[in-house]
Amino acid sequence: MRKVTWSLVAVVLTLFISASLAQASTKDEVQKRGYVQCGVSTGLPGFSNPDEKGNWTGLDVDVCRAVAAATLGDANKVKFIPLNAKERFTALQSGEIDILSRNTTWTLTRDSSLGLNFAHPNYYDGQGFMVSKRLGVKSALELDGAVVCIQAGTTTELNLADYFTQQKMEYKPLVFDTSDQTVKGFEVGRCDVLTSDQSQLYSLRIKLEKPEDAVVLPEIISKEPLGPVVRQGDDAWFNIVKWSMYAMLNAEEMGVTSANIDSKRNGTDPGTQRLLGEEGIKGSGLGLSDDWAYNVVKQVGNYSEMFERNVGMDSPLKISRGLNALWNQGGVQYAPPIR
């Protein structure tokens, strides 16, 4: 009974802290501070990864840059805070960060019990498997009895258990705290298989000494909508994060890029004029300047630009758009209209 009581107290305190922090208005705090505090991974190429000079790049990084461009008018006004999977939610709940943008899956449990809100996914993914070519395995159905490297504190552990149970197969999990430790365990042969979101597998493969010796299997065993997360109780900030993403998606759909956006400002298309703050609600609904979306697209790009340079065909990962194509091009990426 005492354990149940203290667990309940912990949950209530967490929600109370999150609500109190949110009520302080994250937007006002960010504008007063002058930069966005963004929680990212400890290093995942294509999503959030520092170079040798400490400059961060990636799809998740660009989400935070877009929020900074919208809120502060400058995409460079971001402080990136690397977090492992186990500490990421606590950092957001405690107010250490303003936004978590760290290849994090949107689930019912996370959405309903942590005092957090998930904004629009910046990448629709699914869990997969990577194996060494020397094993000669061509399908996940051949993995019975395998030792599997997993990162702790992620949705992959439950997905893996569900999949092997459904397929009536056995496996031995080998759990690590960080993605770097996980890929190192795979590389030195401590496990037969590395499992994670398929996009992450492509990112981890290029970290191997011999990437060509590993292969990502075709099976996808889960739904993994990955996207930014904020604290509950601050709808104004939640809206800014969502609409920063929606601005990039709408811009792609309208053919507006970072290169042609200035010429589009003088156009006659009403949808484009609303996007760029020349007509319509402009910035009043979000409490931002009228050029908030212009700043996002000009400084960060539309969704296609962001995708291609970080994880797409202009990047080392060479991932096709797939589900992340626009809704009118065979994918599921879809933004509400700016009107």
Image: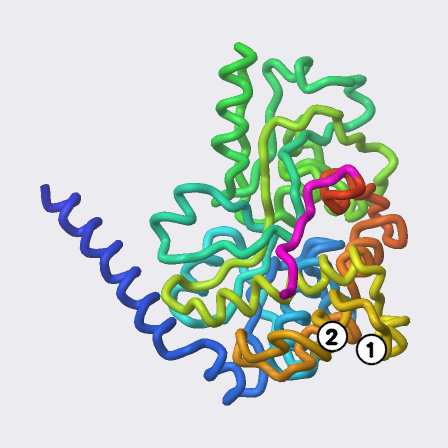
Quarter holding the C terminus is bottom right
Q: Main secondary structure of the magenta part?
A: loop
Q: Find the magenta span and give its range.
A: 330-339
Q: Which residue is mark 2?
A: 276
Quarter of the image where one finds residue 220: top right
Residue 230, how many percent across, how many down? 47, 63
Label 1 and label 2: CA atoms lie apart by 7 Å
Report if residue 161 lies within the magenta region. no
State which tag comes first along the sequence, 1 or 2: 1
Quarter of the image where one finds residue 223: top right
Cβ atoms at labels 1 and 2 below 8 Å apart: yes
Residue 201, how many percent across, how many down? 71, 40
SS type, badge 1: loop
Q: Give me the disc on residue 265.
A: 1
Please tell me which residue lies in front, 87 or 76: 76
Q: Is residue 129 left or right of residue 225?
A: right
Amino acid under disc 1 = Arg
